[in-house]
Image: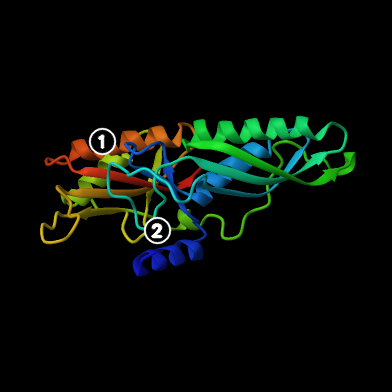
Amino acid sequence: MTTPDRWMRTVREQLGLGRLLPLGGPTDGAWVAERAAREVLLAAARQVPGVRPGRLRITRVAPEEGGEPAVPAPPSALPPGPLRVTADFAASASEPLPAAAGRLRAALTEAATRRVGLTVTEVDLRATDLLDAASEPTPGAAPEPEPDAGAADRLMVRVEADGTDESRAAGAALAVPGVRGLTSTLGRPVLVTEPDPGREAALTRRHVRVELAVGTDLPTAEVSRTVRAAVTAALPDRPTVAVLVTAIG
């Protein structure tokens, strides 16, 4: 890992964003902060009767493998590839444990693949406790807030409509249904990178990275794909575009 990648990882950890997970496959050109995805999955888990979710992580199935993204990725983002959800949970003692685990696995898989758009191929569950009738959770009950919850929302920013390519890209992204706003976790809500023929692995054309927050009405991956298309169409040279989602909700 390079020094800039270590620095970016440190920044993300301080902000509580976690890893930058790939949305979809190599051609989708989008990533989501692990914290944002985790909150969606935990919300789905809390709706499962007879289950109280605990610690949850999203990791790569094969850390040494990964596809090459079609566009430049955000700094130290994970490459496209299958992901694994690992979750702890407590379950009701009033039914067989496999029944509760099956419901939880189905809920997590649906939330990860359909609501967010992660390529989750494995869900590993670990039962950590049994609940009696008095301690069974009520589905939909208000969850305890995670540490530093809402950090990405606090970074919501505005981009002035000043006629620059950055402002045109921002306007195109904000016009997409499902986009709540722009964020600036990695420095700028819209970053335009120019080709530099003098550098190795130089870009063949301009590249735009857009950082944003989305709602829950539409699948996150679908919104990201629409943003990429809208930003590309908004600029005359039709640059490559990458999307980073830092908040969902």
Where is 58 relative to 108, above or below? below
Q: Nearer the viewer, residue 223 or 206?
A: 206
Q: Secondary structure at mark 2?
A: loop
Q: To which residue does mark 1 refer? A: 230
* Image position, residue 84 (x, y; %): 55, 43
Residue drawn at x 80%, y 35% is 97
Task: State left or right for residue 170 relative to residue 52.
Answer: left
Residue drawn at x 69%, y 44% is 142
Where is 46 relative to 192, above or below? above
Q: To which residue does mark 2 refer? A: 185
Q: Nearer the viewer, residue 73 or 226?
A: 73
Q: Tag 2: Cα neighbours inside 10 Å, few (<14), some, or many (≥20)?
A: many
Residue drawn at x 32%, y 43% is 69
Task: State left or right for residue 204 relative to residue 132.
Answer: left
Task: State left or right for residue 95 relative to residue 107.
Answer: right
The quadrant where residue 223 appears: top left
Q: Amino acid at mark 1?
A: Ala
